[in-house]
Image (spheres, rainbow, N blue to C red):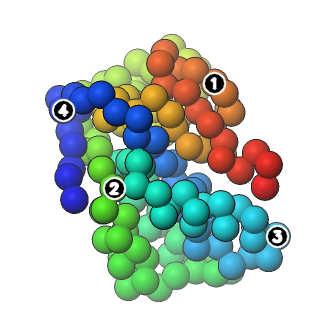
Amino acid sequence: MPVIDSTARRSTTVRFVDTNVLLYAISRDPSERAKAARANALLNEHDLALSIQVLQEFYVQATRSSRLDALTAEQASLLVESFLRFEVAHVTVGVMRAAIAAQRRFQISYWAAAIIEAARALDCAIVLSEDLADGQDYDGVRVSNPFRDG
């Protein structure tokens, strides 16, 4: 399970996965059945990457007591461990600085900018996310909403 920092560079077609993909994968909400199926199909692919931030957000949201289908801490921890099969970007000082600059430049939240910059650190050209604007290009990192039809 490689963990990549912002100094590592390589050419890739790997897609970066945002937290909402992981959360849909565990959803038992009947109204999210199509999104859950799509998320699980994506997670069965091998050309994916994510970041420490995504894993942290997943753990916190998946175990939130107000969530109707909340996971136990143990269940969420096991899933986080399983997601380590993908490349994982560290949130480094370089990524943080780039995210601060991207927040200002693109007028997006810091957290969205940190997702974009973690993807950039792994040379991912595509971020799979429902939370960011579908089709938006952030200076070479493009958002694709994998749920736009579901």
The local crowd at label 1, few if under 14, some if 14 to 19, many if 20 or more residues have their Cα within 10 Å, is few
Q: Position of residue 68 (x, y in %)?
A: 68, 80
Question: What's the CA distance linking mark 1 and mark 3?
Answer: 27 Å
Name the N-terminal-most of marks 3 and 4.
Answer: 4
Question: What's the CA distance linking mark 1 and mark 2?
Answer: 24 Å
User: Along the line of sight, which residue is nearer the eye, 80 or 87?
Assistant: 87
Question: What's the CA distance linking mark 4 and mark 2?
Answer: 15 Å
The local crowd at label 2, few if under 14, some if 14 to 19, many if 20 or more residues have their Cα within 10 Å, is many
User: Along the line of sight, which residue is nearer the eye, 78 or 38?
Assistant: 38
Q: Position of residue 94 (x, y in %)?
A: 24, 28
User: Can residue 66 be seen from the camera position used here?
Assistant: no
Q: Which disc, if any, is residue 8? A: 4
Residue hosting label 3: 31
- The structure residue drawn at horizontal position 55% and vertical position 27%, both measured from the top left corner, is 142
**141 horizontally vs 66: left or right:** left
**26 horizontally vs 51: left or right:** right
Q: Above or below — where is 68 with respect to 119?
A: below
User: Can residue 88 be seen from the camera position used here?
Assistant: yes
Name the N-terminal-most of marks 1 and 2.
Answer: 2
